[in-house]
Image: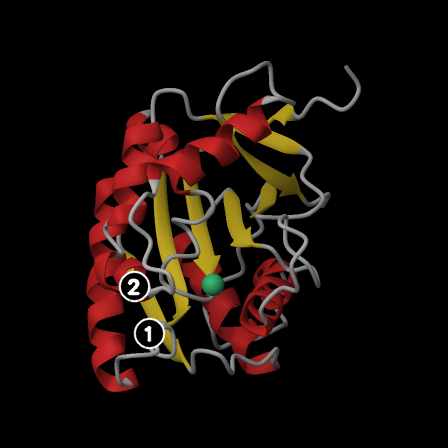
Amino acid sequence: MSDEFQEMPEDWSRALAVVAHPDDMEFGAAGAVARWTTAGKSVAYLVASRGEAGIDSMAPEKAAEVREAEQRASAAVVGAAGVEFLDHPDGRIEYSTGLRRELAAAIRRHRPELVLGFCHHDQTSTGRWNSPDHRNTGRALLDAVGDAANRWVFPEDGDPWQGVRYVAMSNSPRPTHAVDISDCVDLAVASLEAHTSYLAAMRPPVTDVRGPLLGLAQATGARFGGRPAIAFELIPR
Ligand SMILES: [Zn+2]
């Protein structure tokens, strides 16, 4: 069928995932990360903010601590190769040359073949208006892949890295590819559940993570041979 998703490329060994907030990976690509790390691939996380504005009932200084710890725990569940934080202000992440520079430096340091991001469009896969943090981080990331490859752009921030072969965005309204997570649903669920304080503080509190995550994976699977899956928009390069 012509509207079936294509298989995400898996002929790579190192990935770097860059998102705006703790939980962006878990509401998006974590099930795919679990599949890939189980297969021996390395996937590192870089999070632009500490998510300090994400809990209405908790002051930002405390929330930053809690959410950082929860993000590290959830990354460990799916075998991610560590989490770094950039300390941009949650809710006020700006698209800037400075952000591009930080992301290009990270790409040069990690030398990924696959770069993963979170939806950079005005609207996400749900049809809702996207958060400016997601848009700005996603768009800066897409630009930083090119910056990282050019030795004359940010020359003081490491040697150029031209080895990025694939760039894929989760939660996109225009997905093109998918990853079968049949064997990783439990890990994806546990990874999201690790955001304990955040989920409990949502209104209403989120008590069932498995239902919605599995529902989404099955809806994606309807265009992927019936296999529960995570969808990505593979950005042509
Ligand atoms: Zn987010």
Dot 2 alpha-carbon crowd within 10 angstroms: few under 14, some 14 to 19, many 20 or more: many
Residue at the (46%, 67%) spot, across then down: 105
- Residue 143 point in image, percent of width and height: 65, 64
- Compare residues 137 and 198 and report the one nearer the observer: 198
Q: How many marks?
A: 2
Q: Quadrant of residue 139?
A: bottom right
Label drawn at residue 120: none
Which of the colour schemes (rainbow, by chain, secondary structure, one colour) is used? secondary structure
**SS at circle 2:** helix
- Compare residues 125 and 79 and report the one nearer the observer: 125
- Residue 21 point in image, percent of width and height: 41, 65
- Residue 1 point in image, percent of width and height: 77, 14
Asked whether, in this view, residue 4 is left or right of residue 229, the answer is right
**SS at circle 1:** loop
Name the residue tied to disc 2: 198
**Are discs 1 and 2 less than 8 Å apart at CB?**
yes
Asked whether, in this view, residue 197 is left or right of residue 89, the answer is left
Name the residue tied to disc 1: 55
Dot 1 alpha-carbon crowd within 10 angstroms: few under 14, some 14 to 19, many 20 or more: some
- Residue 18 point in image, percent of width and height: 46, 58
Q: Quadrant for the C terminus, please.
A: top right
- Compare residues 126 and 90 and report the one nearer the observer: 126
Residue 166 visible in this rendered orientation of the protein:
yes
Residue at the (26%, 76%) spot, across then down: 63
Residue 9 visible in this rendered orientation of the protein:
no
Q: Quadrant of residue 42?
A: top left
The disc labelled 1 sits on which kind of residue?
Answer: Ile
The disc labelled 2 sits on which kind of residue?
Answer: Tyr
Instruction: Work out whether mark 1 precedes mark 2 in sequence or the reverse, and give the earlier one.
Output: 1
Asked whether, in this view, residue 230 is left or right of residue 22, the answer is right
Residue at the (52%, 66%) spot, across then down: 104
Q: Is residue 221 above or below residue 14?
A: above
